[in-house]
Image: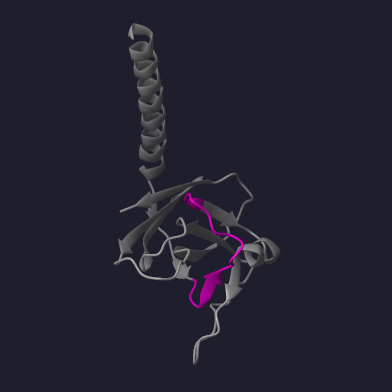
Amino acid sequence: MRRFTAIITLVATLLLCCQCGTSSQLRQAKKGAKTARFEVLDNYYVRNNIGSNQIQRLVIDNEEDFNAYFGPAAIMGGKPTDINWKKQYVVAVLLPETRRPTMVTPLEVKRNDGNVIFKYQVIRGVKGSHTIVPFAAIALDRPESPQQIEHFFIEK
């Protein structure tokens, strides 16, 4: 019993340390971050072979990879948002497959030298009869210099 308690305490401590490190990185990223312009990608759907039981956070910089995850939705009077792959890239969050109507709304994007912070809101409805993969996808301007950028995703 004593050994079991020690193992549980160790695991809890490690998880807490991992959380603190991420929080610390996020705090650093927020320093000097300014609101960035972004474009919400409308009239797309998540392909049916992508369903997952965990959140997926994507950074996509080419059309081929984008098309592996998303397809254009056939909606009367609406066209999918155009993406200029030479000037833009896509940041997306895909939630686990669910039977609840779920809306994922991008709220804010902040950026500094090497960080992008993508803040979004999730609103879940009442359980229904069909499954969906809720998502939010945005297009951001590519940075002028090819540098390593850390992306942070924050659910409000």
Please indicate whether residue 91 sits to the left or right of residue 68 in the image: left
Please indicate whether residue 142 sits to the left or right of residue 27 in the image: right
Q: Residue 31: give x, y in percent of width and height.
A: 36, 42
Depth check, front residue: 15 or 63: 15
State yes or no: residue 15 in magenta: no
Q: Which residues are magenta?
A: 41-56
Depth check, front residue: 110 or 154: 154
**Which residue lies at the image location 63% right of the left edge and 64% below the top edge?**
66
**Exactly how many numbered labels are in the figure?**
0
Quadrant in which the C terminus is drawn: bottom left
Seen in the picture, residue 114 relative to 132 is either above or below; the reply is above
Seen in the picture, residue 4 relative to 65 is either above or below; the reply is above
The answer to whether one can see residue 143 in this image is no
Seen in the picture, residue 54 relative to 27 is either above or below; the reply is below
Depth check, front residue: 49 or 136: 49
Q: Residue 12: give x, y in percent of width and height.
A: 35, 23
**Which residue lies at the image location 36% right of the left edge and 35% below the top edge?**
23
